[in-house]
Image: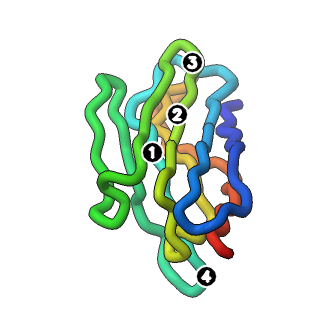
Amino acid sequence: QVQLVESGGGLVQPGGSLRLSCAASGSIFSINAMGWYRQAPGKERELVAVITSGGSTNYADSVKGRFTISRDNAKNTVYLQMNSLKPEDTAVYYCNADITPLLGLVYDYWGQGTQVTVSS
């Protein structure tokens, strides 16, 4: 069994910062790309940021310069540092990872989601 567990969401004022974490656990052989998606009420889920196993990153235009994705391969953990938060960043944030388990083929895993609310 492979699990992704997120933490770090919450309520923050506009202009504030939050740091999300997502740890993968279980029978893992390797982890390829890891990323963060978000889904606001009434909207489709969208990519926020992704990082490859080699450290290459890609960001949605709406978060470039404000958010930073990073990972600790030794801990099987991906982070999302979010600065200068805006009300439009309010959404449920989901962790995603392409993981090859010890037994089986590579699969796309999702976390349970963590709420981020930006409001005064």
Measure the C-alpha gap from mark 2 to mark 1. Answer: 7 Å
Q: Residue at x 49, y 58 (%)?
A: 37
* Horizontal arrangement in the rendering, residue 109 relative to residue 54 (left or right): right
Circle 3 residue = 102
- Residue 20 marker: none
Circle 1 residue = 35
Front-lying residue, 43 or 32? 43
Q: Hey, what amino acid is under mark 3? A: Leu
Mark 1: which secondary structure?
strand
Mark 2: which secondary structure?
strand
Mark 4: which secondary structure?
loop
Q: Would you place residue 103 above or below residue 85 in this image?
A: above
Residue 58 image offset from top left, x and y in percent: 28, 47
Q: Residues within 10 Å of mark 4 (few under 14, many from 20)?
A: few
Mark 3: which secondary structure?
loop
Q: Quadrant of the C terminus?
A: bottom right
Measure the C-alpha gap from mark 2 to mark 4. Answer: 25 Å
Q: Hey, what amino acid is under mark 1? A: Gly
Measure the C-alpha gap from mark 3 to mark 4. Answer: 36 Å
* Horizontal arrangement in the rendering, residue 113 relative to residue 45 (left or right): right
Query: Cβ–Cβ below 8 Å for labels 2 and 1?
Result: yes
Circle 2 residue = 78
Looking at the image, is mark 2 or mark 1 earlier in the sequence? 1
Looking at the image, is mark 3 or mark 2 earlier in the sequence? 2
